[in-house]
Structure formats: structure tokens, C-alpha cells
Image (cartoon, grey):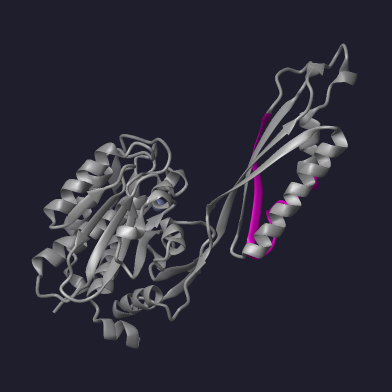
Amino acid sequence: MATATDVDRDRLLRTFLDLVAVDSPTGHEEEIGQVLLNRFQELGCETTRDDIGNIVAVFPGTREGTILVSTHMDTAGTDRGIIPVIGDDGVIRTDGSTILGADDKSGIAGCLELLTLLRANPGWSFPTIEFVVTVGEESGLVGSRHLDVSRLRATHGFVLDTAGAMGSVTYWSPTSVYLTITFHGRKAHAGVEPEKGISAVQAAARAIAAMTLGRIDEETVANIGTVTGGQARNIIPDLVVLEGMARSHDQVKLDRQLDSMRTACEDAARACGATVDFVAEEIYRTYKIEPDARPYREAAAAFRSLGVEVIPRKSGGGTDGNYFNAKGIPCVALPTGMVDEHATSEHIAIDDMVLAARTLVAIVTLPPEGAAAS
Ligand SMILES: [Zn+2]
């Protein structure tokens, strides 16, 4: 009889620390990719690696059906040489100079622990599992965006890559749009012939002042994060570039916000005699998984089987799950125990990492009827 309590705390911890020891800042996944290919192969998976480095590792099931379990191998930013410190309180932190990389190596460690258990217990009943480990997640979901899912057979899936309380099921994520707004004016000597100039700085300032930013409504946020331009104090600036973003769980509200930002820019440019290029690039698209859909139901059943309360979570950010959902594989995202990801204060409680691994084992090994009936 399969039991999630078979998760071996010491082995899981060792696996996690082994992964953290391999540097993998986003965009530099060659080494971790090779390590993971070897691990998944040793554990009995059929592996493939696509042209940008995404790994798909398939472990054959003992019953019908195929599910997707997704993690990412890159870590945020450029940190290398991470030194994990295990506290007396059972929490793994860093020495304070880098991130930890629990995002998302805690998720990967859970997958490897699951595989170890499945290998050791061929009598367990479980579906075929397609483990997808992406590259470039932290650079804007690059790996999942490019992944060819036509080779996958999964009907639904689970993305092990969120913070938040154990028990949380991320069922609703926003659309995120990156904005690059370029104001073009005309350069002139500000002291000698300012009449000939058109200030791109003034046009940009006027546009920003006219925008509604921050929290727009319950679903929608917008921000201008960087302003770059100008050359010298005595030159009327002919170029300013603004970088920003907008997100919403509601596509109509997002479109309305983007329209109003575009209008603010065009009006300001016109008023100043400048021109503007307003470029909005969708980075990922919203998804919403209903509570009666399979991935939600099975994740919730797994948590309940472990006595963990289910917490529906509407997130302010995206995961690779946004692309799997967009490409036709319904997914929810689940917590790995990570806290403060992307910061030098990032940490993870070993107990939470164990619970996340147990949840994964329960998802895979609970009888399908049991999942459906709960
Ligand atoms: Zn992550």
C-alpha cells in the first residue's frame, strides 16, 4: 500500500543540498541540466532535452493515465556559490550573501524523492508521469514558452513552484504584459538654441503624471519601473525609454488599463511635439482552474489525505503553469515550502519540504476514484 509517509527526510534534504550546490543562475543551466539528466536517467526515466535545454523525463506508470509534474532548474538573478546553513530550528537559510535557490530546487528534490519511492515500490498504483524541468523560468517563463507540448500526453498537471502556505492551490493567475515606451524628441543645445529642441523627458514626465499606476482595482496593477534617457544637463534630450508592466486577472480590465496608458503617452507626446512608440508584450496569459477540474481536485484530495487544509490561492504572478494551461494542459501550481524567494532572506523549513514531497506522493498514488470522490 502506497504511503506518503515513506518520504525519507534525510534523503530529501541531501538531494536538495546536492542541487543547491550546483550553480544555475537563469540563462546558465548547462551544468545543472546535465546533473538532472543523469539523476532522472538513473531513476529509470526516459529523458529528452530540447534545443534550449528543457528536460522532459518520463516515468512509466502502473495504471492508465498520464500527468505532468513541472519544476524549473534555473535560479533567480546571478548568484553563485550558494552556502546553505541549516538552523537549529530546522530551517535552511543562506549565509546572507545570496539567494538559497529553494525556488525551485525544493520542487525538483521532491520529484527525485518521488521517483526513488516509485522505483522502490513497483507494486504501487500510479499513472505515467511526465516530469518537465524548464530553463529560463526566471527570465520570463522562457522554457515553458518555447516547450513543444505536442510530444506530451499528460491530461493535466501540477507545477511545483510557489511560495505560500502548505495547502495552498494556485488556481488563478494573471496575464502579465511588459511595456517598453520610447519617446522621441529633438536634440538641441539648451543654452544656445532651446527653441529648436523638443524634450523627450518633458513628454515622458507628462505621460507618467497622467497615468493611473499602482493598484488599479482588485484584479489589476500597473507600474513604470525604469526611466532612462538624456545625455547632459545642457542638451535637450531627444530620447527617453520607460520600462513598465501591467497585470490583471481580468483580460478586459487589463486591456482597458493598457489603452489608458497608451492614450496618456500619445496625448503627452502630441502636446510636446514629440512622438512615442508604445510596445506591449504579453509575457504570460491568465488561467483559472475551477475547483471541480482534475488538477484542483487531485491536489486538494492529496492535501486532505495528509490532514492539511486546502487554501484556494489567487496569485499576483505567473509560473510555467500559465504556459501549460495556455497550451492545453490544465495545471494548478503548488507550494514547495520556499519562503522569500528571489531574496537573500530566502529560506525553507525542512518540515515543509517534506510535507510538499508527501503531497506529491499522495497526488500520484491516491486512487483516481478517491480523488474524484473527494
Ligand atoms: Zn520559481
Q: Residue furthest top?
A: 192
- Region in magenta: 209-228
Identified at 35% across, 76% down, the residue is 308
Q: Which quadrant would residue 215 be assigned to in this image?
A: bottom right
Seen in the picture, residue 116 relative to 177 is either above or below; the reply is below
Seen in the picture, residue 218 relative to 341 is either above or below; the reply is below
* Image position, residue 169 (x, y; %): 42, 70
Lateral position of residue 297 relative to residue 18, left or right: right
Q: Compare residues 40 and 10 and report the one nearer the observer.
A: 40
Asked if residue 346 can be seen in this view, the reply is no
Identified at 44% across, 58% down, the residue is 323
Lateral position of residue 130 relative to residue 374, left or right: left
Asked if residue 229 can be seen in this view, the reply is yes
Seen in the picture, residue 80 relative to 173 is either above or below; the reply is above
Identified at 16% across, 47% down, the residue is 38
Q: Is residue 370 magenta?
A: no
Seen in the picture, residue 165 relative to 75 is either above or below; the reply is below
Q: Residue furthest bottom?
A: 373
* Image position, residue 259 (x, y; %): 73, 53
* Image position, residue 224 (x, y; %): 66, 43
Quadrant location of the C terminus in the rendered image: bottom left
Q: Is residue 220 magenta?
A: yes
Count of all numbered marks drawn on residues in the image: 0
Quadrant location of the N terminus in the rendered image: bottom left
